[in-house]
Amino acid sequence: MDIIDYVIELSQDKLLYFALPLFLLCLFVEYQFAKEKYNIKDTGVSLMMMIFSSIVEFIPKICAFIIFFYLHQISPLRDVIERQWWVWFLLFFADDFSYYWFHRLNHEIRLFWAGHVSHHSSVYMNFGTALRQGVGERIHKFFFWMWIPLLGVDPLMIFTMMGVSLVYQFFVHTELIDKFPRVIEFVFNTPSHHRVHHASNIRYLDCNHAGVLIIWDRLFGTFSKELKGLDKPRYGLTENIKTFNPLKVATHEYIAIWKDVKRSKRLSDKLNYIFKSPGWSHDGDDKRAKVLRKKLQEYEEATQIHL
């Protein structure tokens, strides 16, 4: 097939048409069972973020698809891989691995965090929050998947798998499910694991970046289990923005970066404000997640606190 044939096939992808009504239905049902976990204005912002992210993603997605097509064309494995059934199995792991690093670096590079932070800006954990997608992250997202078409994997298969992963991730944004059996909790991303990811408690910061499989967090040292009692997850940001203005929700961290860059004198500091982890400062306390978690661990060891 040539590029025109691929674009036609991509335009016929109906996954979103089935997924969006399902998402809204689940949101409505969850609201009926747990109205206290919702705020109408907050959910309205989440829906606006979904719309904003779809608009921003349109051109990057088309550009990425074209690039994927030509990377696939030059792959020496193209005629070996094709669209065989077993490729879906390998693609599942490749896609999930890519998502893990995309998601993790969205938390560890401040410029990327500025594009992702809107997803974490709600103090509620519900299906509405699942629709509160990061806006700016849509610009750099597809770079993390560019290695896969070089393996000879069909671009249409890649985009389909990315969509399937996002559908799965919608359902981990809830407090109505406690925990699954231990074997499921060990392998898969679950509501319990993802509540940790959305929590602003120090011990939970920048943990559990999984898409479908939590094994990546276990392998790369970013896993944290959900604790009850004193350290029950508290949702939102370490410093909540307290606004329902969707434009501010989508852009506030970019503005904060710009202010930090302007007030710093040295070029190295300016670059650090852009590319180091959120919380780094050239003239104040280091509030990066890894630093705060280390201090908490040292404090608990010194005081022999075990939660």
Image (cartoon, rainbow, N blue to C red):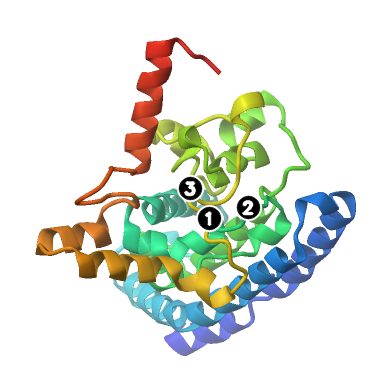
Q: Which of pointers 2 and 1 indicates the residue nearer the eye?
A: 1
How far across and how far down the image is residue 64, in percent?
40, 76
Q: Is residue 88 above or below residue 47?
A: above
> Residue 253: in sight, yes or no?
yes
Q: Give the residue at mark 1.
A: 240
> Residue 156: in sight, yes or no?
no
Residue type at tag 1:
Asn
Please tell me whether mark 1 sits on a helix, a strand or a loop: loop
How far across and how far down the image is residue 232, in percent?
63, 32
Give the numbered dot on residue 123.
2
Left or right: where 215 falls relative to 11: left
How far across and how far down the image is residue 106, in percent?
40, 56
Residue type at tag 2:
Val
Q: Residue at x 49, y 64 (%)?
A: 158
Q: Give the residue at mark 3.
A: 238
Residue type at tag 3:
Thr
Q: Residue at x 78, y 70 (%)?
A: 21
Q: Residue at x 33, y 63 (%)?
A: 111
Q: Is residue 230 above or below residue 250?
A: above
Please tell me whether mark 2 sits on a helix, a strand or a loop: loop
Give the numbered dot on residue 277.
none
